[in-house]
Image (cartoon, coloured by chain):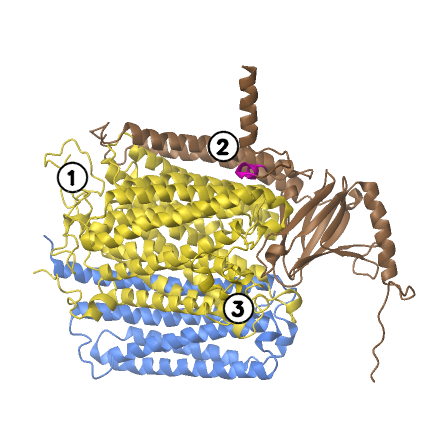
Amino acid sequence: MALMMQQFNFFLSQILFSQINVSEAPSIWSAFKRPIDISTYGHLSDWLFDYITVSITISFIFVCAGLFGFCYYYSAKRNKVPYYTYGYKKAHLKITLLIGLVVFFAIDSMIAGIANKDIKEVFWKFPTADENPLHVEIMAQQWMWNFRYEGSDKEFNTDDDITTNHILYVPKGRKIEYRVSSKDVIHSFYIPFIRNKVDAIPGRVTRLWVELTKTGTYDIGCAEMCGTAHYKMGAKLVVMEIEDFEKWQASANVLAKNGSDPSTVENYWGWKWEKQ
Amino acid sequence: MIDEKTFLEQQKIDGLNIASTISLLIFGMLFAALLLCLILMRDNFVVWPPPAFLLLSISKPTLSTIFIFLSSLFLWSAQRNLSTPEKLKKARISLKLSIFLGFCFLAVQFLFWRELNTHGFNVESGAFASFLQAMTWIHAAHILLGLFFLLIFLNRIRKSRTDFFLNENEYKIQTIKINFYSSFWHFLSLVWVLLLIGLFAPL
Amino acid sequence: MTYAHDIHPAPTTFLTKYVFSYDHKVIAKQFLWYGIFFLGIGGMMALLIRWTLAFPGEPFPVIGPILFPHTNGVVPPDTYSMLFTLHGTIMIFFAITPILIGAFGNYCIPLMIGARDMAFPLLNLLSFHIAVLSAVLMLASLFLPLGGAAGGWTSYPTLSTLIGSPGAGQTLWCLSLFVLGVSSTMGAINYITTIIAFRAPGMGYFDMPLTIWGLWLTAILNALFIPVLGAGLLLLVFDRVFGTTFFLAGAAATTGGGDPILFQHVFWIFGHPEVYILILPAWGMVSDFLSFFSRKPAFAAKATALSMTAITVLSTLVYGHHMFTTQMSPLLTQTFMTLTMTISIPSAIFFANWLGTLWRGSISFDTPMIFALGVVFVFGLGGLTGLYLGAATTDFYLHDTYFVVGHFHYTMAASVLLGGFAGIYFWFPKMFGRMMNETLGKIHFWITMIGLNGVFFGMLVVGYAGMHRRLYNPFVYEFMQNLIPLNTFITWSALLMGFGQLPFLFNFIYSLWKGPIAVENPWQVGTLEWTLPSPPKTHNFDTIPTVKCGPHEFGNPLLKTGRDFQYQTEELVR
């Protein structure tokens, strides 16, 4: 009995969505795992997904029971005389209306209510100044991501900003607010591991905030068709412990400062063109 | 057994009425979508119309407005004079005036576009000029279609066609078509006004 | 005296009989050939896409080297973008619309409501030939030096402006769809007018078959919202050709004021009703077929008709759920989400009515019926997956992933396709006077069903695993490495589905010439077209019928005629 339960649990865990990122030779079933959740709010999205899955699975089981059941029990061979339902019987209308309302109130309203709450209280509740969020500006372009941090003067768009592309260094355990825009066409900043994305729209600044819970390197993708190399327009999210991040930030600040200091020749190069 | 002749004739008449309404709705949705774009775009601006446009002379838009209003007025008069052959004479004159004013409207539009371009209000200069020019182009294209319809109207009631009043059903069918062409024209006048409001009413 | 030959004289020459015909039945068949042709092209494009996803770097078999000589048969990245753009565009506008709306609309409406032709036969003729012009423009765009449109069928600016898409391909795409819009609105005027004004005496709105309800509501949505697409396309063309700045923003906009999101609003105000336009005829047909082949009246038919109407109205209010990730204001986002949820109510109602129709029926599993049952299954699944996308928080994750692709293919490709096939098998006897082969039909059904579920359920799974859309080679991403096997499985299922259409093609073509001759009413059904010979005469009805009962009069125990149904022209036995 215990063995059967064990096997059944194993079977279930293989089939149902699990959060274990096991590295093994991939099979068709490896796709049935969601990416691991590295954010503080990803579980809300996963929970709602699972709630919807349970609701619609139950509904679909009823539908299939009706569909296959009726086809079996009421096939012409089994049921030679159909039941004549002429006209618009009030009872029938009431039943169908009841089904519609039950569906709406039991399933749809719950889902909409939960999603509404999550948006207001979490996803679009951007960090306030006293939460000391890390600010990162993201400029998408065809076909790469540019990331920018404030630099030691705590102001964007100055000479000492830290700029990186392809790799986005972030700390774990501290709120991060991204402000995203695009240079040319619409892109979309997408990190599957935080269950969130936001479009990068030329002429606009959109926002996304997250607090990460695991270190490591994770994929960032572009989730809006943006041209030939849209498929290659990935980046890497490198999540570090706060101490490591601050070390990196400090050294990057120095480099950035030097990079814009005319007196450090090795870092700041360029020369005046003179007409011959 | 039904009397097929009257039944089918009535179907035709009902059908034409319904088709007129739907066609006007279709054109209405096109312009409604364009006006929606205009309104959504206006929302993005702090100042609308952009100050440079206040330097534009309003003489040509005003002239266009007068032309199209008078044109609608004469058309309406023509529509009212279709019941007897004597009145038809008046209708012809009104209709000819209406068509002439329609062509005048188009002429002023061309002059207006030329004036805009020579004064630097060309479409590349921004959203306002884009809307101003593009919407008036689209409107003018429909005016052209409307003039085509009015010419068909004129052809229906021309002197040499004596069969206008011959058959009651034919008369009904022709008047429905004529009313459709005229409604389309009046609709374009309405669109013109809405366009002007959308473009020039300050935020 | 009857006016049987009054509408238009019977045509005599080849051109007036088969090319420039006023007869709605001929125009319907023209749309059918047109639609099936583009279904094939769109399908082939899908296979090219799937091949690239499952076997990157491998040349496509047989036609690959011919199409892509420079890369030895491997699909290049730019072409891949064109392929998925045109696959979507062709399937929606050049395959589904002509088959479901052009062919079935034209064929069924006059016959089922007791009219001799559409209200405006000339407009009908023009509608077809303008659609041909549109197809020519679209196909021509493929032969331009810089190729066809490559920004997705949604063609968002600024990718679809000159910055992202240089050349004339995108412009021709816009013009082609604008022209097609003209054709569709002409058709819509015809359908709405005919249904309202040309019904036979005695046929009230609720005596119309539900197929006609579906086609009528589709035509209303078409009439109202195609012009909105037209407006958007016009503005995009102006941006590309005349240098206007409606949608230009970012570094490319040297002067202020363009807004790419404006296009998204306009596009989806059309786009959401459009997906209901595509599905409504199929819903109507399935509602009728379930009743016909269960030999009992459609359960709560009036409620089904009213639910379809409610969905039609609601569909105009929910477009914002395509734009959740553009960060509209929270109020707008929440409003669109709530309204999107309300569409579940009428959907659940008519779904329940479908099952109610089967309940206690006497079901025979002819080919049209099994396809209709297939629609119930796939639409149930596909419709339910829409809930994930309607809830904004799950949508933040699932937007622009293969989950969306799986969802809309279940509801559009699977449901509409199966519904379309059901219609073809059902009306083939009436259209061509011969029966299609039942065995081949069943083989066609099962292969299509298995293939289709493999493809689109697989897409739901990879989408949930995070795979996003419109990728030439997804496996440059580390997190998608474990999705390769399932992607390969999806491609094999797609190939199976593609091959599954061969029995259909063979069946169709063979039956046209050698199928058994059809009797007047092979399915023993009471709607008006089955009172006519197969195929009907040019003028349809010798005398306009008088309708005395509804379209689903099956199994009335008081019937004494020996039949188990009543024609709509017979007085209802009570």
Magenta stretch in the rendered image? A27-33
Q: Which chain is brown?
A: A
Which residue is labeled 1 in the image?
C572
Label 3: which secondary element: helix
Which residue is labeled 3 in the image?
B197
Residue A49 vs residue A20, the one in the foreground: A20
Q: Quadrant of the C terminus of chain B?
A: bottom right
Marks 1 and 3 sit apart, C-alpha to C-alpha, by 58 Å
Label 2: which secondary element: helix
Determine the colour of chain C: yellow
Whether residue A176 is visible, yes or no, is yes
Chain at numbered mark 2 = A
Q: Amino acid at mark 3?
A: Ile
- Residue A29 highlighted magenta (yes or no): yes
Marks 2 and 1 sit apart, C-alpha to C-alpha, by 43 Å
Residue A55 tag number:
2
Residue A22 vs residue A146, the one in the foreground: A22
Q: Residue at x 37, y 49 (%)?
A: C499
Of badges 1 and 3, the one in the foreground is 1
- Residue C53 highlighted magenta (yes or no): no
Q: Which chain is blue?
A: B
Q: Amino acid at mark 2?
A: Ser
Q: Are marks 1 and 3 on the same chain?
A: no
